[in-house]
Image (cartoon, rainbow, N blue to C red):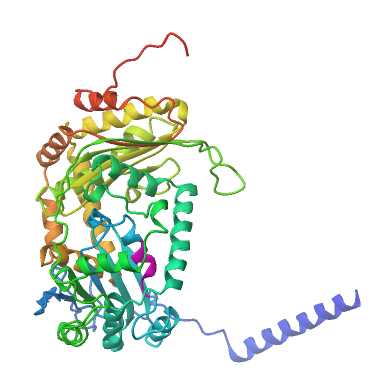
Amino acid sequence: MAAAVLAATRLLRRSGSWGRSRLRFGPAACRQFSSSGTYPSVPLSSPLPGVPKPVFATADGQEKFETKVTTLDNGLRVASQNKFGQFCTVGILINSGSRYEAKYLSGIAHFLEKLAFSSTARFGSKDEILLTLEEHGGICDCQTSRDTTMYAVSADARGLDTVVGLLADVVLQPRLTDEELDMTRMAVQFELEDLNMRPDPEPLLTEMVHEAAFRENTVGLHRFCPPENIAKIDRQALHAYLGAYYRPERMVLAGVGVEHERLVQCAHRHLLGAQPAWGDVGDVEADRSVAQYTGGIVKLERDMSSTSLGPRPMPELTHVMVGLESCSFLEDDFIPFAVLNMMMGGGGSFSAGGPGKGMFTRLYLNVLNRHHWMYSATSYHHSYEDTGLLCIHASADPRQVREMVEIVTKEFILMGGVVDGVELARAKTQLSSMLMMNLEARPVIFEDVGRQVLATHSRKLPHELCALISHVTADDIQRVASKMLRGKPAVAALGDLSDLPPYEHIQEALSSRDGRLPRTYRLFR
C-alpha cells in the first residue's frame, strides 16, 4: 500500500513539474502538416508547385535485351539473355530423357539425374563441387523430363568462368564410381517407394496416362526407373547412353544475367573440343522416333483408405485421369490449346482465393461448385516437340466413380461447344498474366531460353507470346477442341475401381453429343 502511494506521489510531482514548465515556456509547439494553412491545398490530381516534372518509363512490352544465340564449330549452341543483377543462372540443356531409352535399359535418365554433380575428373567428390560453388554464392540442380535433361547453376556473375568449367566437367567428365552407383540405387529405390506412398497421386497418374496414350513408344516410356532395372544399370550402360545423346549438337549452354560475349568465350574455353569420359564412340545414330498416339487405359487397383497426411486420415478416394491428344509446342495450335487449358482450370474443392486462383474456370463453376462430393477436378496440358496431351484429373468417393467419369466426359464435349466471350477474355488475361509473372524469376527465364533454343534454335519473347494469346478467338477454341475430340481417349485410374466404367463406354461417351455414358442395368446391387 505504501509503495502504491509513493508511486502516485511521484506521478503527481512529474505532472505538476510538466505543467509548470509548460506555463513557463508557453504552449507546446505544433507540427505543421501540409493540410494546415502554411502550405497551399493542392489536389492529388495536380502537380506540386516548384517540383520538377517527373519523367516516367514507358512500358511498351519490349525487352531491353533480346536473346542472343551463337553456334560453335562443334554444333553446341550458346544462348544468353542479359538481366540486371549481381547473380546469374547458367546451365546446359540436353536433348535427352526417357523418350530416347527404347534401345537402352529403361530408367537411365532417372539414374543420371540422381548422379548429377557427383565426382568428376577435376573434383574428387560432390562436396568439393559444392564448396567451389559456395565461393561464388552458388547453388546447383539437375532435372530430367521425358525429352530434356537440364544441369543448372545460380551464382555470382563474377564467377562465370568457374561455373561454366564446372558444368562442363559435370556433364562430360563424370567418374561414376561404384560407391556413387550404389548410393544412386538407394536414392532411386526410395523415390519409387515414396511415389507409391505419397498422398498426392498426380505424378503417378501422369506417368500412367502417358503410358496409356503412347503405348510403349517415345513419351509413353517410363520416366521413372522400373524396380527390376535398378540393379542392372551400371557404368557400361550409362556410358553407352551418354555416348549417344550427350553430344554437342544436342546441347545448349544457356545463361541469364551474363554478357553474351563472355559466355561464348567460356564455352570456347571449356566445351569446344572437350573429350568426354566415355571416349569417342563415333557416329551413333540417335533415336528419332516420332510419337505414336495409341490411346488406351491403364488401371492400378489400390487400397487408398490408409493414405494419410497426418494423424487425421484423408477420405478414401478413387482418382481418374482422362486425356486426349492435343498438339506439339511447335504447332500454331499450341497457343489455343494453352488458352483452352486455362479456361478449364480447376483445382481442389478446398482451394482458397478469387479469380486469380482460377475460381471462375469451368471446372470450378460447372463441376466443383455443383457437385459437392467431388474432391478435385483439374486440367493439365503436356506438350512435346511432336505431340501433346490435354488431361482432366478428377477424384471422388469410390462409390461415385461412374458419375464422376460422366461429368468429366461431359466437360470434354462442352469444350467443342459455345465459348462465352467473358470466359475467353478472362482465360487469355490469366494466361498472359501467369506468363509474365513467371518470367520475373531468373531461373524461369533460363529454362525458357534453354528449352526454346534447344527445340527451335531461337526464342520468342514474352511480348510476342502475349500477342499470339490475344489473337486467339472462340472459333480457334472450338476448332482445336473438335479436332481433339475425334481421337481415342487415354485413361488412367487409381484406387478402388469396382465402379469404373469400361473403356469402351468412356470412348463412346466422348463420341456422343452430350458426353453421357451408355446406360447400364443391374438386377442386383
**Quadrant for the N terminus in the image:** bottom right
User: Where 60 sits versus 191, above or below?
Assistant: below
Residues in magenta, as a range: 111-117
The residue lying toward the viewer, choosing from 339 and 185, is 185
Residue 381 x %, y %: 25, 47
The residue lying toward the viewer, choosing from 127 and 186, is 186
Q: Residue at x 24, y 54 (%)?
A: 99
Left or right: where 213 falls relative to 111: left
Q: Residue at x 20, y 75 (%)?
A: 253
Q: Quadrant of residue 377?
A: top left
User: Where 475 sits versus 240, above or below?
Assistant: above
Left or right: where 442 falls relative to 198: left
Residue 88 visible, this orientation: no
Residue 86 x %, y %: 30, 84
Q: Residue at x 63, y 87 (%)?
A: 23
The residue lying toward the viewer, choosing from 200 and 280, is 280
Q: Main secondary structure of the magenta part?
A: helix
